[in-house]
Amino acid sequence: MDRSQASRRRLLDAGAVEFARYGVAGARVDRISVDAKVSKAQIYSYYAGKEQLFDAVLDDQVNEILDKAPITGDLPDYAVRLYDAYLEHPRLVRLATWARLERSPAGPLFPQADETAKLDVITAGQRAGRIRTDMTAADIHSMVIALAMTWSPSSLTYTATPADPAADHDRRRAGLAAAVHDAFMR
């Protein structure tokens, strides 16, 4: 990794911490600069402004989750892998929540994202008779994600942490898999 790539990596990591804690409006480029050991001038040479840096941070965090939990036709397993990914990377959920609150209060959170490949996996399962067909692939995908986020930092009832007892995580994973199976699989 060259120096420029290393600087960008530190910038994305420091930005993830700052934006997750304060949102776009409350985040300060000065703090990100200090934490990343990257000058403000260098930040602005990479990104036009704080909004663009937030977009890059959110995209980086989403890609990390997608790498850890790619969608498969086994929706219960996919939901459990998302649960684990959200548990391991709670910043993504906080960043997405800030994006929803401050930038995209309605409609798709990622309007530029091409969801075709994900929806094609669900559609293929529908055609094969493994996934229910009375709902759109997009609706099923949204609901599986919502179920997987039940214990995430955006939960209204309980936020799980890695420090919770393993038995609690096992119980949640089993319940999540069963709920997704019963709701969407045939």
Image: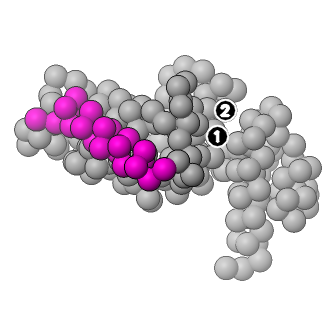
Q: Nearer the viewer, residue 160 or 66?
A: 160
What residue range appears in magenta? 165-186
Marks 2 and 1: in contact by CB < 8 Å?
Answer: yes
For label 2, the crowd category at 10 Å Cα-Cα, with few meaning under 14, some 14 to 19 and many 20 or more, is: many
Left or right: 172 with respect to 25? left
Q: Nearer the viewer, residue 12 or 94?
A: 94
Image quadrant in which you'd find residue 144: top left
Q: Which mark is residue 98?
A: 2
Q: Residue at x 70, y 50 (%)?
A: 16
Farthest-out residue, left: 129
Q: Nearer the viewer, residue 170 or 152?
A: 170
Residue 169 in magenta stretch:
yes
Q: Which mark is residue 33?
A: none
Chief secondary structure of the magenta portion? helix
Q: Is residue 96 visible?
A: no
Q: Residue at x 53, y 31 (%)?
A: 158
Give SS at disc 1: helix
Q: Position of residue 66 (x, y in %)?
A: 45, 53
Type of amino acid at the residue the image marks with label 2: Trp
Image quadrant in which you'd find residue 136: top left
Residue tagged 1: 95
Q: Position of residue 22 (x, y in %)?
A: 78, 37
Label 1 and label 2: CA atoms lie apart by: 5 Å
Q: Nearer the viewer, residue 142 or 178?
A: 178
